[in-house]
Image (cartoon, rainbow, N blue to C red):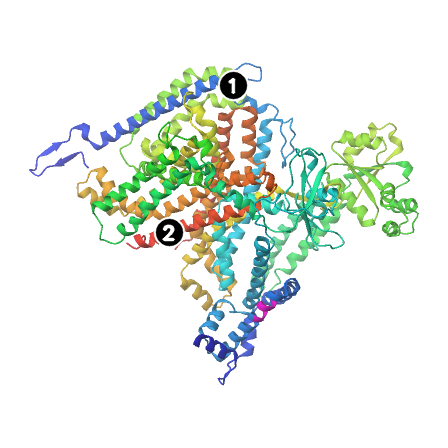
Amino acid sequence: MDVILSNIRALVPGRKQFHLDLRRFVAEQITRSWILMVWLIAFTAFVGWYTIGQLSAAPGSTTTVLIIWALTVYMTVISELQKDHTPLTFWLKENMYNSINNVLVTLFLTLLILAGVRAFYSYAWVNASFETDPITSNEERPNEITVDDALAAYRVDFSNFPEGSSLPPRVILENAAGTPIRQVTLTKSADDPNIVIEELEDIHTGASWGSVIENLPNILLFRFRDPVIQWRIWASIGVLVVLALPSFVVYRGERYRGTTTRRLLTWAWVASPLIIFGLLYGLTAEGPLQVVDPDQIWGGFVLTVIISVFAIVVSFPIGMLLALGRRSNIQGIPWWVTYPVAIAITIWGLLTTTPANLEASRNTAETILAYWPLAVPVLAFFFQRSFKGNVVAAFSTGYIEVVRGTPFIVVLFMSIILFPIFLPSGWDISGVIRVLLASALFSAAYLAENIRGGLQALPNGQYEAADSLGLSAFNKYRLIILPQALRAVIPAIVGQFIGLYKDTSLVYLVGLFDMLALANGISSQNNWLGIRTEPYILLMVIYFLGSSLMAWYSRRLERQLGVGER
Amino acid sequence: MAQGSIDPSGRRFKLPSLLDVRVLGVLAQLAFVVGFILVTVWFINNILSNLDALGESQFICIDGSSKPRCSFDFLSSDAQFELAETPIEYDPADSYWRALGAAALNTLKVIVSGIILATILGTFVGIARLSKNWLVANIAKWYVDILRNTPLVLQLIIIYFSVLLALPQIEEAIKIPGIPIFISQRGVNFINATFLPSAGVWLAFLVLGLIQAQVLWWILGRVEEQTGRSQNRFLWPIISFLAIAILGWVFSSNDTNQSILLGRQLQVEEISDFETLMLQRYDVNTLGEIDMLVANEVMTQDAVDELALSLCVLRDAPSEVNFTAQLRQRGIPYTVRRLSSQSRATSSFADGDCEVYVAPTAVLAGERDILENPNSFLLLPVQEAPVRWSIPRIEGFNFVGGGKMTTEFTAVLIGLVLNTGATIAEIVRAGIQSVSKGQSEAARALGLSEGQRLRLVVLPQALRVIIPPQTSQYLNLAKNSTLALAVAYPDFWNIANTTINQSGRSIQIMLIVLAFYLSISLIVSLMLNAYNRRIQLVER
């Protein structure tokens, strides 16, 4: 109450004296430079023009905004002149009205946001339809619009459609004379070649949320909708919940540090991906845990989660090995081995293959390629210089850099196209598994760079201390280096997990049924021909919520672990 | 771990050489090499046996034999697919090489324009994130959050299907008042400068003018130094530059490499004679009245078009832009027949489909001799401006003239720019925040304006922090351009994929694709590393 009163008091000029140096005010706010003056004049004119436009489009809300704006500006100005601010006017002065320009910007942006919100509100709520079965649910009304009119408005060639199909009632026919907006649906009956026109009772010009509502179980679960196997999804979620609930207690504070309970829970967490994989993939040929064909069964949000979790879990050990490999400084192959071998290969190549290749060459490129042995010493030189003969480091670096230079979508296609060529002909790996392996191998390269960052951030003293304690190399990394390095890169790893979660949307391009593929499919369903925006909005929400949640959790984790503080 | 150590009793002892770290290291290396070679050999064996199963077609040569060295030969055969848009000329009868080359240029087009626009957008949004205005800062924050927390491919698809394809059709294209830009379902058509052949001469003049202005600026500076009187170092160079530019324009306009070919029976000796010709044809007193004919219902639109001057031109030829611009200036009505080749245009002209044949002089002089009785045709030089505006107009179901961005290109560009711009905004914000507050305070204390503070003090220092992560964002943009596949923009990856599907040669194409994207990554990072070194040099 006090707050409101004090703000109301700010509306009334008090007895206090005004402090206003008008000349200085004008010099600072308007005539500081001629660019500012021109800008202010042009911007004022533009905002005025825009406000008038909005006033005629939506008088009520615009007037309200204008009144609130004028009132708050007035309050702020009076408070500023009296040098007596309430918390509200002070905040307004600092954040909204700190210059004439910003006063205008604030008005303009408020009106702009208002217009956006209004448009979205009318699209998504006022004019939207939530009908899940649009074609049969509407009563027939007297026919007033000709079929030709309707076809012209639909802009599709309905004559080519098979008999029995119908167009969704989402096109609005507006008469030139200004008669009310009407909505029709067209149906081609099986026995009658003529197109039947129906006019619908409830008219909507906005979103058809029915398409999303009807398809939501499909988008989330895909074939796990099937009641026979649906329990496996709930069981998987159950496993996670059962593990998560005690975690809130056990991992908080010092009470359970080092106890068996905590160790058991950790092992359960480590094992949980395997359990869930068993539930979702199946273990036996028959019975309740029958092995499913992932190409047919996995899809939708379930597939998104499977791919991103699998990729991050599997890529973790690979990425760690690659990071350690890239940083390894074990004794390399000495130069007096590398160079003689390289020169031997060169001489052998020049003597045996080059003459034959030169003879068979058909163009300049092949002539040049015939001298390939000459490249071997050069490569050997760079290998010795950059990696000091360390093959492990060279391989890790090469793998990381090549993978990081390749687009993910290319890697996905390679997995689909090249896996069968790279493996013996008997091995038949399903598409989903190929994509899973490719995602893990792809993500390992990025993870390796993150972990390498953590290893590099560690001061050298830690390595030396571990050495001086006489720890073996394995124990040095297990007990001293990795725990510290990994803690430092947890935010980066979560960030990468978010990236993977978003990147799973690409798998629809290689023919998997992820959420995007299912959303695209809606537009060719009979009831929802051409409807795309609504499912896409749903997907945006799902991805946005998932990523934001993980980002928020990562920030919290970062604070808890005190990254960058110790 | 040294080789020999001193044990507590003071005796030197030698480790058995098998436990020496260096020996162990080399052994580990050798084991790794052997393992690596074994795995590689296994893969190669699999590949070879699988390729055998696929048949010899993988290695077919032009002469029909099958050798491994011919594995890339198929790229010289006909591609037989269309490309929706190409920066170079391409025909389905061209080779796969040319198709891939055109697609590579499409990719480069997206990458280069995307990098430039994303940098501009990201910088603005990054600064807006730190705006003092709460609304501006929060709008920027939400923009960044939404774009960064949703998949790029979904954004691309939404931009393509829900935004661009929902735009009005071509006849109802959105016009921006005052500027000839048309936005429709089919993309963006905009006014575009067409350079005619004589533009080379004019550009030479411009370069000359620039050099001259620079020299004059320098001389005036010296005079100022020596005499101590202040000289106007901007006005005179600019005036002389403009004078040279105008001179060059006039000079190059006298060039006569544009002409028109027309029958003598038209009795047209120079361009202005067309006016009298049209006045006679329409039976009006001034050309302005022609527009009134339809309005007053004296004639139908078809009848007006029937009488208009009909032109034959080569498709996309600058000579058309030049000549029709002059006809429009004079108000002469005309219709245009665009033909795809010289011989077609000539035969169309010979058949009397059109009265005037517009082309470069050299072309027309040759073509006139082919006609049945060359002497009854007249070659008329046309004045040429070095640069003409080409304005898009609707003709039939398409836009003619001007520049064009297809819907697919626009979608890919907008998607990449919005997405990368959001990430760059975060980098720019972090960079600006890394500059200590004292720098800003010092700048304000010196009386610099907010703009000057950003431009002269904060950004140069922030750039050092910004450039390294920016590099990886540019690389991301280059790699993300492969998502063009989702909206069917013919970029390199899309066309490579089509080639794999059509030719069945997956390994070869995949190698080319890897080489292409790895070299783009390499080039971009090399360029930015060089720039980075230059910036870091100024470090304290």
Same chain for mark 1 and mark 2? The answer is: no
Q: At label 2, which amino acid type do we have?
A: Tyr
Q: Is residue A321 left or right of residue B381?
A: left
Name the image quarter holding the C terminus of chain B: bottom left
* In the rendered image, the vertical position of residue A461 relative to residue B14, given as above or below: below
Residue A74 is at least partly visible in this image:
yes
Q: Which residue is mark 1?
A: B59
Q: Which quadrant of the figure contains the N terminus of chain B?
A: top left
Q: Tell whether A555 sits left or right of B200.
A: left
The chain that hosts pointer 2 is A
Q: Is residue B233 magenta?
A: no
Residue situated in front as seen by the camera: A407 or A225: A225
Q: Position of residue B458 (x, y in %)?
A: 46, 59
Query: Of helix, strand and loop, which mostly describes the magenta segment?
Result: helix
Q: Nearer the viewer, mark 1 or mark 2?
A: 2
Q: Is the residue under label 2 in contact with that under label 1 (CB below 8 Å)?
A: no
Label 1: chain letter: B
Circle 2 packing at 10 Å, graded few (<14), some (14-19), many (20+), is some
Could you say which disc has been placed on residue A553 in the image? 2
Q: x, y (%) of residue B292?
A: 87, 52
Q: Position of residue A193 (x, y in %)?
A: 71, 34
Tell me the distance, in whole angstroms, between the alpha carbons under discs 1 and 2: 54 Å
- Residue B113 visible: no
Disc 1 marks which amino acid? Phe
The label shown at residue B6 is: none
Q: Residue furthest toward the left?
A: B9
Asked if A8 appears above or below B291 in the picture, the reply is below
Region in magenta: A62-67
* Residue B443 versus residue B492 in the image, above or below: below
